Structure formats: C-alpha cells, structure tokens
Amino acid sequence: MNDASPGSDLLTDILAVESAAGRLEGAFLADPELGRMWRAQMVLSEVCRSVGLEDIHLFEGDLVMRGFENRNTSLATARGALHGAELMRVMARPGDLRADPVAVLTRCLRAGFAEDRALDQEGQGAEWPDLVALAPGIVGEIDAAPTPVLAAIRAAAHLRMATAAQLPAAERLLFIAVDHASRLPHQRDHATTEETGVAPLLGQIRASWVLLPSMAMTAQGFRAWSPGSARGIRDLLAGLRIESGRALGQLPLLRRWRDRARQLAADQPGKSHLDDLVTLAIHQPILTGSGIAEALGVTDRTARNLVDKAVDARLLAPITGRRSYRAWAPLPMAERLRMRNPISERPRSTRPDPTEADLRVGHESDAAGQGDAMAELDAALAQADEILGRYRPVTLRE
C-alpha cells in the first residue's frame, strides 16, 4: 500500500495537469484574443520567476519599465532584467522542434547561458554539448513520452544531463518549447524575432504553450528545479497543478475586461476609434501616444483623447508617473506591473556560489536518480493505462 501511494499521487497530478492544460488550450483555440492577453501577462511572470530561481529578485514592473525610465536600479535588478528579456525572446517565438531541433536548442542555451561565461564569436560557450548529437536523443525522449507534460519533463531532464545541470534556465525554456510544439502539432513556426525591447516583444508573441515551469516551482514558495529527480518531478507536477488551476481562474477576469471594453466601444455615438484602441491594447498591451497614433492612423490629439476616454472608463491605466513619454496598459496588465523592486540594493544572498565540485556532485546525483524518477513516472502511467486505456503518443515527427 505504501509503495503504491507515491505513484498514485503522481498519477493524480499528471491527470489534473493535463486536464487543466487541455481546458486552457481549448479556451485559447476558441478565443485567440483571450490567449493573447493571458500569454502577454504570463510571459512576464514566467521570466521573472525563472530569474528569481537564479537568486535575482525581479518583478514584472522592473522588466517592462526599464525602457521608459532612468531609474537608479540595483545592479542585480538591471542584470536580471537583461537576462529576462533574453528569455522572453525565446518564449515569444519558441521555434519549431519538428523542423529544426538544433535551432531551438541553440536559442534555449543562448538565452539561458550564465552571464559570467565567455561566449565565442558564434554565441556558443566552450562547455556546450554537441547539439547535432544531442538533438536526436531529446526528440527521442519526447516521442517516447505519452503526454505533453511528460514530454517536456523528459526533454528538460535529458538536457540537464548533457549540460551537467549548469544551465537550468535553458532547461526550463526547452520545457516551454516542447509544450508549445505539443499543443498545436499541425502548425509550423520557423520565424524568430530579433526584437530585444520588452514592450515590443509583448506584441510579437506567437506561441501555444500553457504550462510554465518557473511559475510552478514558485507556486508554494521556492522549490528546487530538478527535472531529473523523483522529488523534483513531484514538486514540478504539484506546482503545475496549482498554477494551471490559477490560470483557469484568470480567464473570466480577462474575458470580462475585454467584453466590457468592446461594449463601451460599441456604445460610443458616431464613428469612434475606441474599438480599434481596444483591439490594439489586446495585441500590443504596452501603449504610447505616438504608437497609438501611428497604429490607428489618427492624429496625436485624437490619440490622446482616446486614451483619456479609456482611462476614465477604467479600460487603460497609466504605468509611467510622468507627463512626457507616458505609457499605458490594459487594467489587468497595469495591475501586474505595479509591483517593483525597491531602488535600494537588496541584501545579497549569503549562499555561496557552487564550486566545480558541487556541480559535479549535483550532476552525479541527478544521473543516479533520473532512472528512478522516470521509473516512478512509468509506474504511475501504468495505473493510468488501466483506468483510461492507452494514451495517444505525443509525436514531434511527421
């Protein structure tokens, strides 16, 4: 009885996560605008939590507002914001694992690469694994996984072994890239973006992911990211279950804002650009006066009047506290951006940096535990086979 309990808990979490993920995926397929709004918010939160797992305190407001102000931020916050922007570039357009897994791995590793390691002229570090040799193994792990969440876990664990657990942010990006590929397998996405500004990136999100690993690892306080260990997988699944439930709870709030905005625009007398402004805010949630005027083809004065009307109706809210170079966001996004780091330097962590020996020991520990962890997952899925029948494999190859 005791031996069956951990597997039963894993099975419960796997089924709950996949059920919630399926509901999110279905909601976004039926209502793409809802998916755009949700992902624009969650991409900010995910990269901030990913940076936080590397012991750098960063909030969504810090990430977005660096492009609008000259704030005397701490060095750690500035470094975290730069790293977060690189992570955002991958999350906005994860790429196509089916067509070019090496390109996806390259982007994940470059974005997750530690800042204190030198890069060569091609952007690759000397300690990178052979990606051409690594890619088939990762794709094989994905093909062998019976569900999207397990495909993402297997891929992240495989990358962890190949990099000696030194690039955890890259592992989490690969998790997201696998989830993206698994959700809409009929779509191809070869395009990537060279845009580095956070605000423009929010308008260029072309992704289908619904599961966010860094959010999961911080759902109940900070948990250690370790997709190759039994404890790490249990913590990840438990966190994904919590966060996917929270995501489902966010959808009515976003839908209510959008529906109210559309109704107010429809009630405007005569020809009004308010509905166009609402559409723009959904697709590009960080707005400036000049950007509105250019996008809608109106004068600066008309753009200002539209913004004033939207602010009075509590559709938009200002996110900069200045008279010039102002910016606005939809009310749900503006609420998320209000939390900021204090200007003063936060106390630095007293945790010592890991030594090469520490990393080697951690890598060996992962190597020893990964087989047991995957065996535990297989046991849980064997129970699922008895209850639900055979799962349809998640195949990334045509």
Image (cartoon, rainbow, N blue to C red):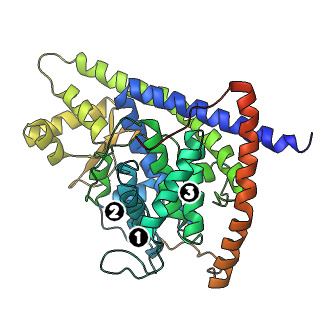
Between the C-alphas of marks 2 and 3, the distance is: 31 Å
Do labels 2 and 3 touch, CB within 8 Å? Answer: no
**Circle 2 or circle 3, nearest the eye:** 3
- List the residue tagged with mark 3: 156
Mark 2: few, some, or many residues within 10 Å (few <14, many ≥20)?
A: some
Which amino acid does the dot numbered 3 rest on? Ala
Which amino acid does the dot numbered 1 rest on? Ala
Residue positioned 35% across, 81% down in the render: 120
The answer to whether residue 218 is visible is no
Give residue 81's position: percent from left, percent from top.
41, 64
Q: Secondary structure at mark 1?
A: helix
Do labels 1 and 2 touch, CB within 8 Å? Answer: yes
Q: Quadrant of residue 353?
A: bottom right
Between the C-alphas of marks 1 and 2, the distance is: 8 Å
- Would you place residue 226 above or below residue 394 in this image? below
The answer to whether residue 18 is visible is yes
- List the residue tagged with mark 2: 66
